[in-house]
Image: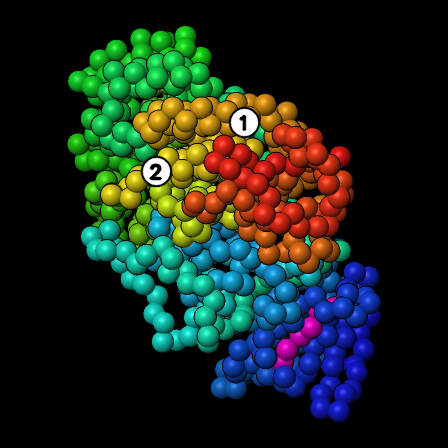
Amino acid sequence: MSIELQATETDTVLVLQAEHSQLEFTIWQAGFKLRRDNGDLMLQSGSDWGSPVSNLNLWAVEEDRAILTFNRGSHGVGRLTVTVLEDGWRFSWDQPTRDTFSLASGKHWYGQGEIIHQLWPMETLSLWEAPLMTWDNGPSGLGDIQEPVWITATGVAVYVENATPNLLVGFNAPPPNVPIPQWDRASSQAPASTRPRPTMPGSSGLLTLMDRRAPLSYLLLVGTDVVDAHAQVIKHVGKPESIPPEALLTEPIWTTWARYKTNISQQVVLDYAKEIRTRGFPGSTLEIDDKWQQNYGDTSLDPARFPEPKAMVATLKEMGFNVTMWVIPFLHPASTNTQQAVRLNYVVRRPDGAPYDVSWWQGTAYLLDVSNPYALEWWAEQLKKLQHSIGLAGYKFDAGEANFLPADAVTFMPINRNEFSSKWVQFGAVHFPYCEVRCGWHGQRYSVLFRQWDKFSVWGLDNGLASIITTGLALGMAGYPFVLPDMIGGNAYGDVLADKELVIRWTQASAPMLAIQFSLAPWDFDEETVAICRKYAKLHVDLAPQRLAAARQATETGAPVIRPVFWGSPLDEHTFTIKDQYMLGDTLLVAPVVTPVTTARDVYLPAGAWRDYWTHEQYSGGQWLRNFPAPLDSLPLFEKL
């Protein structure tokens, strides 16, 4: 690293030069610019680093780092250590500090994880400054898989290595007169389209980071382009060593939830399976969702509704299904497991020592203490007994978000609330690899399916069909390659139900994805719906070799299976804002219809030679195909030659 001072007419600029980039600190304005060696701007701070930081001075220089001092008014003098890394820079403050980054300087932004109104790219949304934590239906719009990483189209990533829920993050925050929606499970929720809102007049234009209790530290990782910046991120967040069980990836999963909700029984499950097979649909897995037990937390099936569970599972296996069941970290006071769990201190407690009854979507219950290794060993034992006694393949691990752990809860080992999510995921991945999970915090290394949050039966980016693409892309950019879109057609909550067209288009959009999940039955509509959905369920099977190849590549490079269109052309600015197309690996481009009453759409082909999957007509890349035909039974799909 070399250091020099450059004087301009108005400022003194401190320049730190490394092999991969240079940092320029404007001394009197306390701001920075990150440039490539050729001078191109990659990222810069906001107008300053947030009052009252000002007046940086070079205090010390070592072989790989520079130490700067800065003024904090009445707070005295602070210190910033800038360390050069092989792939970027580390900023380490010696006290809580609010840093800002200009969104315009990065051009377009990707990552962070799941957001309820999943706009793409991120600069098109306006997210309130709030603690970064995993949420089930977060008030500000945060979802259940989060990662403190943001990647720009200019090829730089901002990554907070040791973030806790004390980290406040704002992204293009709304003006102060727009309050964060407040709600609890007993009150109405703000519409998904406002969580978060699209960017608006007065939005900040900044990414803001501030740790409320600890000195702020983060990395600026430098890539040759946006895809290479993602590769630099993977070096820090990690990647899975193996792929999920192939049966979960090669044929659809079928689940009882959206069609039946809690109205399930042994006969309902068997009839459902027969309907699937009678109508010629493929499927490797049948998932028995909520509510197979008498009381939440039981590890035996309700004998009134499931009198012969072992025989039921055996019949399902004969029909070609692996069988999984739904599990949550909650124990109802009446559960057969609760008395032992409370006696052995296997549930989280209130400050006064009493078991904590937490609120969740099915009422209140005690919460498994995932910080307690003895509790996890005990819970794994209960689930394995059930698994082996009736022949289950594995489980669906639901919930686990940080918001379910109360801020004042007492746990066996001190953990922050986001660690509740990471430990719940780790539990499932280690003990039951044939599984899916719904939450994630630093979970990129696990070889499990990370399911997107419960989708609504609507079309748009406000947690509807269009958002299965943008959520999948966002999770991939945050380092999660193994993403399971939620149930085809959405969850049919309340009186918002899917219609024929939505189910067909949802099936088409999902079919090339790594794994897919049916619940609403196409035969509940008409025979045309059955025929089209069956065609694309079989396409999912036909494309299994491409998906498995992309999944194995993820274990080598960390590249997502479902990729943004810019993946093969990372300098093509046309690709940076495409939100309704995706790549399967390197070889397939998917352009589904995600708007109602639509029979044609524009398709962008990035660089290269392409062939229509269905007609074999060839096209040159780097062009738009305007008004490309897409009747109801058609999915625009292109192979790279």
Q: Nearer the viewer, residue 192 or 530?
A: 530
Q: Is residue 571 visible?
A: yes
Image position of 555 (left or right of 320): right
Q: Amino acid at mark 1?
A: His
Spatial CA distance of label 1 from label 2 is 22 Å
Residue 606 picture location, percent across and down: 70, 47
Q: Which of marks 2 and 1 precedes in the sequence?
A: 2
Q: Amino acid at mark 2?
A: Asp
> Residue 325, located in which quarter of the rendered image?
top left
Residue 141 picture location, percent across and down: 40, 56
Tell me the residue that label 2 is attached to: 499
Segment tinted magenta in the rendering = 30-35
Tell me the residue that label 1 is attached to: 540
Q: Is residue 479 visible?
A: no
The N terminus lies in quadrant: bottom right
Q: Residue at x 45, y 58 (%)?
A: 132
User: For the residue labelled by badge 1, is the local secondary structure a helix, a strand or a loop?
Assistant: helix
Image position of 382 (left or right of 14): left
User: For the residue labelled by badge 2, is the local secondary structure a helix, a strand or a loop?
Assistant: loop
Image position of 542 (left or right of 18): left
**What secondary structure prevails in the magenta region?**
strand
Q: How many marks?
A: 2
Mark 1 Cα shell of 10 Å, populated few (<14), some (14-19), many (≥20): many
Look at the picture and state if 180 lies above or below 247: below
